[in-house]
Image: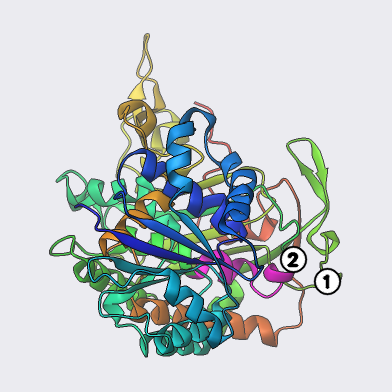
Amino acid sequence: MAISDFDLVLFGGTGDLSMRKLLPALYARDRAKDLPEGGRILCIGREPMETAAFVAIVEKKAMPNIAHSSLEPAVWQRFCQRIIYVPLDAKKPEDYKALAAAMRSDKDVSHVFYLATLSDLFAGICKNLAAAGLVTPTSRVVLEKPLGRDLASAKAINAAVGSVFAESQIFRIDHYLGKEAVQNLLALRFGNVLFEPLWRREWISDVQITIAEQIGVGGRSGYYDHSGALRDMLQNHLLNLLCIVAMEPPISTDADAVRNEKLKVLHSLKPFTRATLVSNLVRGQYRAGHVEGTAVPGYRKEPDADPESRTETFVALKAEVDTWRWAGVPFYLRTGKRMAGQLAEIVVRFKPVPHSIFNQGNSADMPNCLVIRLQPDEGLHLNLMAKMPGDGMRLKPVELELDFREKFKTARMDAYERLLLDILRGQLTLFMRSDELEAAWTWVEPILKYWEQEENDPIPYAAGTWGPAAASALIGRDGLQWREEALPEV
């Protein structure tokens, strides 16, 4: 689908997300000739400066985030000509006159407002855009996470933005939904007959979803201390991945058809009780340790950190989806910073064979599992048992592997590239609807209240490990283990 002419207004245009992800992604799509010639990028910042001075900043901060092999002087020059800098204080309604003067009023030019700012500013920006006459029936607004701190604040954001923009104009972004492997999970499930008969409680033992980061919070302690791993990662990224795994087949790939099925999953999550919060939830915080041989400080020793902070940098929990398809199948969700590896993957583990005819002990009873790897290398891995060469019937785990980079030689888009194209096309399938957002917060809310009421600190874990031992105990009570742990030798 071709993209029409556009004015993309980037609030937070001088910020880290714009320089690290958004502008490099737009350059990549310009290089691929996906953007129309007249498409413009209006970058908003508070500091007064000319566009030429801002472009020099872009070259210094955004260009290093573009692969050297992709940098072409002619393309870069063309891309920079799209950029217009508009100094504006988002809180001052009178400043929006300058934005109105810079934007085109041609009805064939779509207006996209990308709010890469704190969510506290969303309501005021939308109100000021409307007061300046910049919101039309064809305008779109993009909201970056975190979308609120709890259910009440999420509802307030939805109400404020929804008073200016229709739901069909609002794009709540979660970049994990733009990853190639997530798209391929949809293709795997609903484009093949092989897995559908097995994708249910009769054949699946458990599902693990892990997003592990080696980095710490660095200089972001001010933000992170008001967020934590639950708000930053689990309430959005991990729950969206769970929905893709557990959803029923939609009737089509239309936006509401897909989002209706995701919403059903969120409504089907078994609510927490006091007992399940105690037994099925682990909260951790990293202490000093070593990551790839380098000594790193603990969370409370990071720059500008609160030395008595109780903010979690690690969460692991057990969830259940109360439907006929999934009743009794545990979903284990885990995320953390300063972990032993950089990893994002979904592991669907199947039940063992009902009766093993091979007299080898546990090694022949290892269950099959499907691994959907999101990072660092995107791909699909199906673990099976096969006979080892030689005399006797000795089995060994083997992998059927689909490496997207090797299989498809065409240049791959990163998540933000794909999502930006969908925004410019007006395609909502990969973006959350307001009722999805509120359903996710409704399920997470009891965890937040439980942590507010209890006086215990998060469990400490050494940086460079896979988190607190309590996380292994959580899954171990069900006779299972996290996938990063060593498999038995054959």
Residue occupying image coordinates x 58% and y 37%: 486
Colouring: rainbow
| Secondary structure state at the residue bearing disc 1 | loop
As drawn, the label of residue 306 is: 1
Q: Which residues are magenta?
A: 222-235
Q: Is residue 476 above or below residue 328?
A: above
Q: Amino acid at mark 1?
A: Asp
- Where is residue 59 drawn, in percent x and y? 60, 44
**Residue in the picture at 34% in, 24% down:** 386
Residue on which the image places disc 2: 221
Q: Is residue 123 magenta?
A: no
Q: Residues within 10 Å of mark 1 (few under 14, many from 20)?
A: some
Q: Is residue 247 left or right of residue 398?
A: left
Q: Is residue 275 visible?
A: no
Asked if the residue under mark 2 is in contact with the one under mark 1, i.e. CB atoms within 8 Å, the reply is: yes
The residue lying toward the viewer, choosing from 434 and 8, is 8
